[in-house]
Image (cartoon, rainbow, N blue to C red):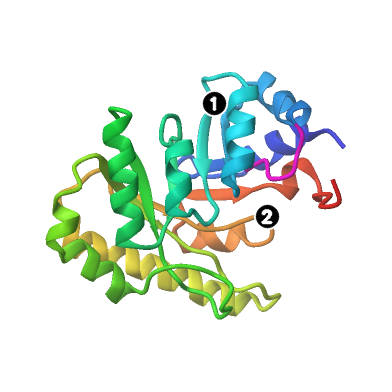
Amino acid sequence: MNIVENLKNLKKNLPENVKLVAVTKTHPIEKILEIYNSGYKIFGENKVQELVQKYESLPKDIEWHMIGHLQTNKVKLIAPFVSLIHSVDSLKLLKEINKEAIRNNRIIDVLLEIYIATENTKFGLSQEEASEILKSNEFKLLTNIQICGVMGMASYTENTSIIKDEFENLKNIFLYLKENFFNEIAHFKDISMGMSNDFQIAIDAGSTIIRVGSLIFGERDYSK
């Protein structure tokens, strides 16, 4: 299996407005360097510890995305370098990211994670909860974060009509938030949805960022 060819084959079929985040979860540095040396530099990680280790071991011009659940006490570890945090699911987390952004003299880009699936194991805000955050006076004080859109994960199911409905729901929530809170804000433009098994459905529903791992790197070996 040639992972560089996998990446090229995937990229050539993507619309120009869709960004591909190559998800490196559990994959070794050597594989990531293969992709990097081919010229691709946009990678995503689910866990903070693994993200930090890979950041420290790899070239510093990589655009790193934090795509997994993020605890407030881990924000400080990625604040110096992370390009986009996809998984913001509380005002508390937004405030912590803002605090660490100030400490690092940065403005950190984030997405609001929206709960669109049926599983209790997934995280995220409802449309109402996201609206309450954006209306709050506390949010208005956060000067060092930039909300660039929304992220969501569909249900783990082979029923494509369920997945399609959930992605379309996320697109509608994005449009609602755009109209009501970010109408004149150019950077509120991204919908992060779609992974290896459902990215085409996500793109059809309006995704601008897809998070793909196994289609590029192969299936993960969780025993290592």
Task: Using residue 118 as the reference point, say whether residue 82 is left or right of it.
Answer: left
Query: Which secondary structure type mostly characterizes the magenta part of the structure?
Result: loop
- Decide: is 68 above or below 143: below
Q: Position of residue 169 (x, y in %)?
A: 42, 73
Query: Marks 1 and 2, Cα distance to the nearest angstrom?
Result: 21 Å
Count of numbered tags = 2
Q: Where does residue 74 sit, x and y in percent of width and height?
A: 48, 46
Q: Secondary structure at mark 1?
A: loop
Left/right placement of residue 218 relative to residue 176 reads right
Amino acid found under the numbered disc labelled 1: Ile
Relative placement, left or right, of 154 versus 148 is: right
The image shows residue 200 at horizontal and vertical percentages of 60, 58
Q: Is residue 183 visible?
A: no
Quadrant location of residue 42? top right
Residue located at (42% from left, 52% from top): 72
Determine the residue located farthest toward the front in the rendered image.
73
**Mark seen at residue 196:** 2
Q: Which residues are magenta?
A: 22-28
Point out which mark residue 129 bears: none
Task: Give the mark nearer the N terminus: 1 vs 2.
Answer: 1
The residue beneath circle 1 is 62
Query: Is the residue 173 above or below the residue 38 in the image?
Result: below
- Pointer 1 local density, CA inside 10 Å: few below 14, some 14–19, many at least 20: some
**Which amino acid type is shown beneath numbered disc 2?**
Ser
Q: Where is the C terminus found, in terms of image quarters?
A: top right
